[in-house]
Image: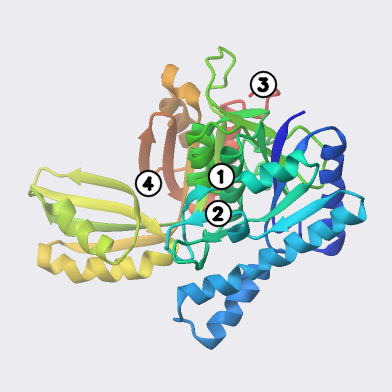
Amino acid sequence: MALIVQKYGGTSMGSVERIEHVARKVASWQQQGHQVVVVVSAMSGETDRLLKLARSIDARGSQREFDQIAATGEQVTIGLLALALGKLGVQSRSYTGWQVPIETDSAHMKARIQKIDGARLLADCQAGIVPVVAGFQGLTQDGSVATLGRGGSDTTGVALAAALKADECQIYTDVDGVYTTDPRVEPKARRLDKITFEEMLELASLGSKVLQIRSVEFAGKYKVPLRVLSTFVEGPGTLITLEENNVEDPLISGIAFNRDEAQITMTGVPDRPGIAAAILGPVGDANIEVDMIVQNVGDDGATDFTFTVHRNDYDRGLEIMRRIASELGAQGVSGAADIVKVSLVGVGMRSHAGVASKMFKSLAAAGINIRMISTSEIKISVVVDEMYLELAVRTLHKAFGLEEATSA
């Protein structure tokens, strides 16, 4: 018998029929002798609907009240799932985040979990009752409802698994695991049986939408075995776990990409100490996050400074750069919003040389020009023109043999 925390997302809870399907899955796990704690999201699209209602009254209103409104979506689904379980003869009890309780800081709409008291949930499990917990929410020290931000139900699931010392946290979604890349871009992409926390964190941060980044960080920190499964298709899913020293581990585990990139370049900037801070300081002050940075120093003592930002921040970033270009004595500012970032991820890079060379040669052979390059211990990212996204992903997927049926 194992203690398992299961999290079901908005798509899984999208209708009464789907909620009843989830109830049958939960009941099956309990019938196998397992203790099950369930975490659910609001129905698909419900949180957006609620926030749209709030903003229609006051788009700049109190974030505390926005949280009060948004948190009601999960309160509906926990009640519906508890009813569906009861209909199947399974004893169940629904809990909002503050009834558990899950304590958070006071950063409304992006709160972080600080403490969980799992005594009630464990008592339920021992009594044969299935607790159904609202994801995405908690309670601040002053007694206010707080939400955890987009994807926060994943974080709730993992945090509960850590607090309850669960044997596994299962994330149920509309895909049957983590793939070598997006199957919609590369039909030959295959599901991974296993991947490390570190690799999954990189993939999530680089554009993979399977799991929310904070939930992966939490799982890795507290060593919670994490499994991604499909609500609708039976299968083993993908296990996310600690790195193991295995000679069969693949060189590359996956290819991630991000379409939301934009590039800004300031040319002919005098090369002197503090120039990078002078350029990026105003960008940071405007709350614009910078991703990749490249600086090239020429023989004439001038430098070209290029960086990438989220595409939504492109116009504001350009405006800021043009404003400070004259102050710095730069020659000009240019940019491009039609770029993408493509990344290779794999712990095997630590012990294998030549990955970057193979990547660059493969892209060159396909006629794809590289604009920027960034590397870390287990990833290599390149920026290319958006029109080459699918070709780049397919080229690299084939070059590194990711379609082969080897164990991951």
Query: Dot 2: few (<14), some (14–19), or many (≥20) neighbours within 10 Å?
Result: many
| Mark earlier in primary sequence (4, 2) | 2
The percent coordinates of residue 213 (x first, y second) are: 51, 46
Query: Dot 3: few (<14), some (14–19), or many (≥20) neighbours within 10 Å?
Result: few
Quadrant placement of the N terminus: top right
As shown in the figure, which amino acid type bears the numbered disc 3? Answer: Ser
Which of the 4 image quarters holds residue 74? bottom right
Residue contact at pointers 4 and 2, CB within 8 angstroms:
no
| Mark earlier in primary sequence (3, 4) | 4
The percent coordinates of residue 21 (x first, y second) are: 86, 52
Nearer the observer, disc 4 or disc 1?
1
Q: Is residue 230 left or right of residue 252?
A: right
Query: Dot 4: few (<14), some (14–19), or many (≥20) neighbours within 10 Å?
Result: some
Render colour scheme: rainbow
As shown in the figure, which amino acid type bears the numbered disc 4? Answer: Arg
Q: Secondary structure at mark 2?
A: strand
Which of the 4 image quarters holds residue 26? top right
Q: Which residue is mark 3?
A: 407
Q: Is residue 34 above or below residue 115?
A: above
- Whole-Å distance between the Cαs marked 2 and 1? 9 Å
Q: Which residue is mark 4?
A: 371
Does the image show residue 20?
no
Query: Which residue sits at x=52%, y=58%?
Result: 148
Residue contact at pointers 2 and 1, CB within 8 angstroms:
yes
Q: Secondary structure at mark 4?
A: loop
Residue closest to the far right: 88
